Image (spheres, helix red, strand yellow):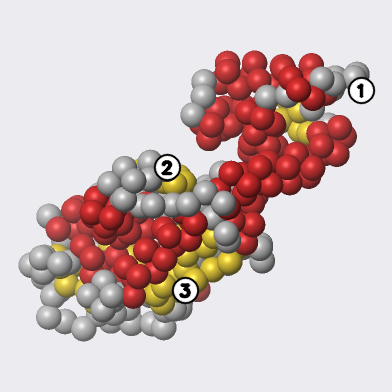
Amino acid sequence: MKQMNIGAVDLNLLKTFIVIWELRSLTAAAERLHLTQPAVSHALRRLREMFDDPLFVRSTTSMVPTETAIRLHEPIARALGIIHEALHTHSSFDPATATRSFHLVMSDMSCSHVLPLLMEELAHAAPHVSIEVQQMAMENLGAAMRNGDIDLAFGYLPGLPEDCQSQLVLNDDYICMLRKEHPMVGQALTMENLLQLRYVYTNTNTTGHQLAEDVLRNAGVKRDFALRMPHFTVAPEIVRHTDLALFLPRSIAERHNLDGAFVLLDLPLEMPRIPVSLYTHTRFSADSGIQWLRSLLIEMFGREEIVP
């Protein structure tokens, strides 16, 4: 490797290296970093010049790290984490005047439940704070939290590493949602009429949703799907105006049913309880901003009128 001028090293290039490592895709890295793909390609060229190595080689399916990249990954990730920690550990956080942006990971289901409440709280307590929400594959989330790219995650996330500390906020389960004018309202939901309903299906990859789907599949419940969608957000509104049914977490269903437009029915088979938690990384336990946001969310879910 050629002699390197340490003073010329751009920390943004090192962050780009970490994101390419995690995602193995320049396109996905550009999306994560909010850059264009040519900008990420240019950053990779500069990294290659800096380390005198290709670092990532394109295969048919992904960008494969070289031996040099493999050796560099851990010390670069550790160094960026230390820098992030140093910048926030000793800085005071006053929510009334703070202009910080927090990066959260949660599913679209969780967004519909959490964000209306959270943004209402922030409007009063921290009017200049901003929130950026992402969805991220479980295999990338732990590293993103360790590197400081993600401040807090919300949901049922049993695959996170042990250095991601968690706080349980509720135990959830899945129910069936119908509009209150549905012909089946007034009847107990049996296995027989469960199979007679037509459904909206949301193809979310959240862990809790997949757990519930596994129970239904193992019980032999084969649903008739009138609509399949890649996201959840609009599904309750479709149920509101049709005789279609929807399986979803009880907490989210109750949140959408504040106006009494729906009937929420227990399923006629034993559904798993889904522990929903807030996750932060132990590396940033002294970050006053993250701890403030974490405490705010825990306090929100601790209120009797919010917890189902």
Residue displayed at 23% across by 65% down: 255
Q: What element carries label 2?
A: strand
* Residue 292 in view: yes
Above or below — where is 175 with respect to 66?
Answer: below
Element under label 3? Answer: strand
User: Is residue 124 found left or right of 279 in the rendered image?
Assistant: left
Q: How far apart are marks 3 and 1 (CA)?
A: 48 Å
Q: Which amino acid does label 1 sit on?
A: Met
- Discs 3, 1 touching: Cβ within 8 Å: no
Pick the residue in front: 147 or 10: 10
Tag of residue 168:
3
Q: For the residues carrying marks 1 and 2, which lies nearer the camera in this image?
A: 2
| Percent of width and height locating residue 144 | 60, 47
Q: Tag 3: residue type? A: Leu
Reply above or below: 275 against 85. below
Q: Which amino acid does label 2 sit on?
A: Ser
Gap in angstroms between the C-alphas marked 1 and 2? 38 Å
Q: Name the residue under label 1.
A: 1
Looking at the rendered image, the quarter that the C terminus falls into is bottom left
Taking the spot 53% from the left edge, 35% from the top edge, the residue there is 32
Residue 115 occupies which quadrant of the picture? bottom left
Residue 204 visible here: no
Residue 212 in which image quadrant: bottom left
State the residue position of label 2. 101
Image location (x, y in percent) of residue 264: 22, 74
Q: In which quarter of the image is the N terminus?
A: top right
Residue 149 image point, x, y percent? 56, 44
